[in-house]
Image (tube, helix red, strand yellow):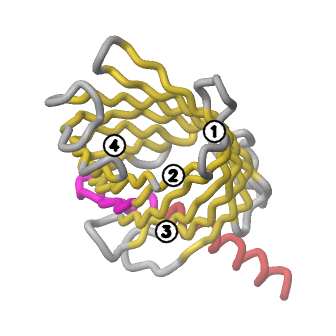
Amino acid sequence: MKKIRLVIAITVLFLIPKMGHAQINESSLGAWYMYFFNTTFKESSWGAQGDIQYRNWNMGGDLEQLLLRGGITYTPKQANIKFTLGYGHITTGTYGDEDFKTSESRIYQEALFPVKFGKRVYTNHRFRYEQRFVEHQDFRTRYRYNLFLNIPLNKVTFEKNALYLAFYNELFINGQRNIGNGIDVEIFDRNRFYAALGYVINDNFKIQLGVMNQTTNHWNKNQLQLSLHHNI
């Protein structure tokens, strides 16, 4: 009898997120509120970066994710690339009134390198590898590639009072299909496409407001994104 109850409990546990995905209102706009920071330790090659993201299925209150992330960065001298080793903690909620939440610890490594085209087209290529410890799942990994594109409008560079267009497209690929307890996921995890208008407040602060479209195997949804970018 105890074994039967355990099987039922595990089945319900894994069905809840899937039922939530099926009931997502894809036409409603969600909202992500984000703070990003980066700094360099004096004039060395070492630094730190991180972000806090409060993600909602709606404009606020229906938690999609709360993400806390930070890492140590290393930029080799005379090399136009930055490496990061970091850790993130993510609390994920389900859509609607259901109060079910899961937690995740994540270790990641990434490489970021910029490429400039002409005088106004700034791109960044980011490759990220994640090791994921998700509650009630087996150990997982994921590969991510993000192409960023930023174009100043009223200035040539990102100086004070500059307006700019910001775009990115990020592809997520799962490293494993079986995540435990007989649950399989697809190799394709998700894709995010983002378009925004940015404003340079000063040398230390930029702000962006835009919309990100996120596509998974279960749903497709637009999210408003408001982000503050802080150079400490």
What is the x, y in percent for residue 161? 18, 43
Whether the magenta-drawn stretch holds residue 159 is answered as: no
Crowding at mark 3 (Cα within 10 Å: few <14, some 14-19, many 20+): some
Q: Which residue is mark 4?
A: 213
Callout 3 secondary element: strand
Residue type beneath disc 1:
Arg
Judge left or right: residue 86 versus residue 116.
right
Per the model, the C-alpha gap separating discs 3 and 2 is 20 Å
Q: Which residue is mark 2?
A: 38
- Front-lying residue, 97 or 79: 79
Task: Say which residue appears at 41% left-offset and 60% top-offset.
Answer: 35
What is the x, y in percent for residue 82? 62, 35
Vertical arrangement, residue 75 with respect to residue 178, above or below: above
Callout 1 secondary element: strand
What is the x, y in percent for residue 217? 50, 43
Task: Say which residue appears at 59% left-offset and 37% top-offset.
Answer: 144
Sequence-earlier tag: 3 or 2: 2
Task: Say which residue appears at 53% left-offset and 61% top-offset.
Answer: 18
Task: Say which residue appears at 53% left-offset and 78% top-offset.
Answer: 100
- Give the extent of the magenta segment: 21-34
Crowding at mark 4 (Cα within 10 Å: few <14, some 14-19, many 20+): some
Of the two numbered discs 1 and 4 in the rendering, the one whose residue sits closer to the viewer: 1
Residue type beneath disc 4:
Asn
**Residue 143 visible from this viewpoint:** no
Q: Which residue is mark 1?
A: 128
Crowding at mark 2 (Cα within 10 Å: few <14, some 14-19, many 20+): some
Callout 4 secondary element: strand
